[in-house]
């Protein structure tokens, strides 16, 4: 019974927040466009609800400048000074309100992952796609960058199994606390980021 209500709450919440955040969205987009000398947005194909592809939108925090061999630099080296600030404040997620409004995402749910990861899931891990992916999720408030892939995906399964209004409320409150304290946010060169899931699982 909660799932239809959840979608209505997502729709109303996204509409209200898009209006409220419009000034900061405009200023950030302008600043990032100037800093990166191009589009302020990062758009990428992800796997979403019922394993349908969609284009996630985020504020761009990295430069596209290649190394001397014309290969992309590591993420830590591509992160710009402004991009670091935007990430530390989790402001790069604001454009995903559009994804929520379109029905492609929810405020709370498993984070949408890369399309190429689809063959990498084991056992019941694919049930993460039976709900809309979220801007935040259980895995994000239980460890974020400190979790390995097995733990992250296990939390996604747990979320789907225990989906409820109270669980979403607890996750949202924990997310607000995490953002305000920058808890679990790592943006430096030694962030210990995970290897890609397909590399981790040998796909």
Image (tube, grey):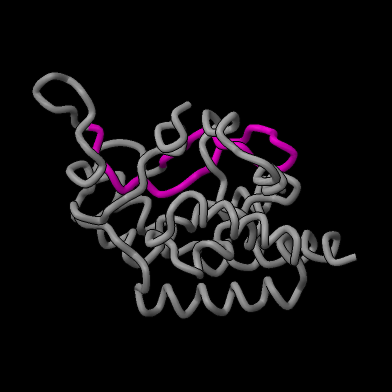
Does the magenta portion include 57? yes
- Looking at the image, residue 128 lies above or below residue 85: above
- Looking at the image, residue 39 lies above or below residue 7: above
Residue shown at the point (26%, 42%) measured from the top left: 75
Which quadrant of the figure has residue 92? bottom left
Q: Position of residue 109 (x, y in %)?
A: 64, 58
Q: Position of residue 149 (x, y in %)?
A: 47, 49
Say whether residue 54 is left or right of residue 61.
right
Q: In front: 77, or 144? A: 144
Residue shown at the point (46%, 80%) measured from the top left: 177
- Looking at the image, residue 183 lies above or below residue 96: below
Q: In front: 110, or 92? A: 110
Asked whether the viewer can see residue 171, the reply is yes
Q: Position of residue 1 (x, y in %)?
A: 90, 65
Q: In front: 105, or 128? A: 128
Q: How many marks?
A: 0
Say whether residue 183 is left or right of residue 109.
left
Q: In front: 97, or 194? A: 194
Of all residues, the one furthest to the right in this rendering is 1
Residue bounds of the magenta highlight: 42-64
Asked whether the viewer can see residue 102, the reply is no
Of all residues, the one furthest to the left in this rendering is 68
Residue shown at the point (62%, 56%) measured from the top left: 156
Which quadrant of the figure has residue 181? bottom left
Residue shown at the point (67%, 61%) measured from the top left: 158
Q: Position of residue 59 (x, y in %)?
A: 40, 49
């Amino acid at each position: 019974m909660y799932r239809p209500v959840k979608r209505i709450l997502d729709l109303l919440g996204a509409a209200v927040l898009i209006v409220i955040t419009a000034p900061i969205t405009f200023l950030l987009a302008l600043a990032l466009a100037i800093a990166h000398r191009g589009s302020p947005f990062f758009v990428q194909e992800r796997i979403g609800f019922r394993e349908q592809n969609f284009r996630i939108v985020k504020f761009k925090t990295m430069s596209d400048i290649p190394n001397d061999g014309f290969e992309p630099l590591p993420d830590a080296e591509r992160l710009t000074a402004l991009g670091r600030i935007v990430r530390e404040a989790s402001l790069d997620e604001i454009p995903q309100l559009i994804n929520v409004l379109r029905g492609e995402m929810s405020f709370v749910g498993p984070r949408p992952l890369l399309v190429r990861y689809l063959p990498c899931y084991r056992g019941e891990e694919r049930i993460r796609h039976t709900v809309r992916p979220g801007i935040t999720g259980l895995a994000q408030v239980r460890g974020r960058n400190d979790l390995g892939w097995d733990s992250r995906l296990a939390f996604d399964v747990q979320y789907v199994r225990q989906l409820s209004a109270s669980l979403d409320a607890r996750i949202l409150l924990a997310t607000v606390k995490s953002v305000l304290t920058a808890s679990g946010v790592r943006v430096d060169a030694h962030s210990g980021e995970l290897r890609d899931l397909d590399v981790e699982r040998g796909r």
